[in-house]
Image (cartoon, helix red, strand yellow):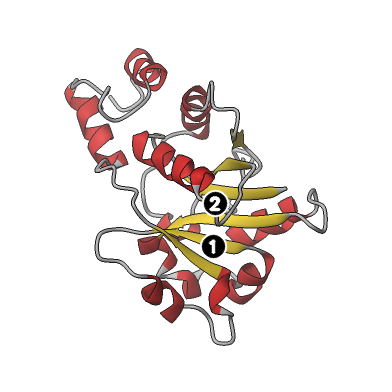
Amino acid sequence: MNLALFGGTFDPIHHGHMAVARAALADPRFALDHVEFVLADRNPLKSDWPITSFEHRWAMLTLALEGEPRMKANDMERLPPESKLANYTIDTVRQLRKTLAPGDRLYFLAGIDSFLHIRSWKEPERLLRECRFIVVSRAGATLQEAIAVLPPGTPADRVALLDGVNVPVSATRIRQAARAGEPLGPYVAPKVAEYIRRRRVYA
């Protein structure tokens, strides 16, 4: 089995996230069986950013993935409300590795802007041994950029570039639109838009 983890806060899950997952699933280089969206509870690299409750983000994620048999929602990073801990990718990958067979291949989907800071992640060398990275490109980005930031001694084949995904939408813009009462259809799935409106998630 070939599996890709797609980690993020997904605040909210939007068309851009879905386009990335579909592009990775369609790419014959990876031969993915499915993509697992791992919802982060607390991102240690964004600890000062306000974030919507895990429950709202989880509800929106599961709604967005309805009818997508090759995409799954994963809540393994959910933390107890009283916890002061944060989620680290290496811990998630190690935990998931225990459920896989020796021949299974594990990938991690990440945007290139995030990947360029890979050396600031927890145990980056170990992480790149545990899984390969599918790095989502942006206009003008190159594979050489991603290779250049690999920890010393890491083989270049631990990273691949996924390009051709161009959906100009951001979670920040969606939250602004929601607060302004603007239509959310251009950005998120209908059920997600309805959830945001009905629950006043970003009001």
Most foreground residue, 19 or 65 = 19
Q: Amino acid at mark 1?
A: Phe
Displayed quadrant of residue 108? bottom right
Residue ID at (72%, 59%): 94
Of badges 1 and 2, nearer the viewer stands 2
Displayed quadrant of residue 157? bottom right
Of the numbered discs in the image, which one, if any, rests on residue 133? Answer: 1
Q: Amino acid at mark 2?
A: Pro
Q: Does residue 40 appear in this view?
A: no
On screen, residue 112 versus residue 39, left or right, reads left
Residue ID at (80%, 48%): 99
Residue ID at (58%, 80%): 155
Q: Residue furthest front?
A: 28
Q: Does residue 29 appear in this view?
A: yes
User: Residue 141 appears at what percent x and percent y?
Assistant: 30, 66
According to the picture, the residue beneath numbered tag 2 turns out to be: 28
Residue ID at (60%, 53%): 85
* Placement of the C terminus among the 4 image quadrants: top left
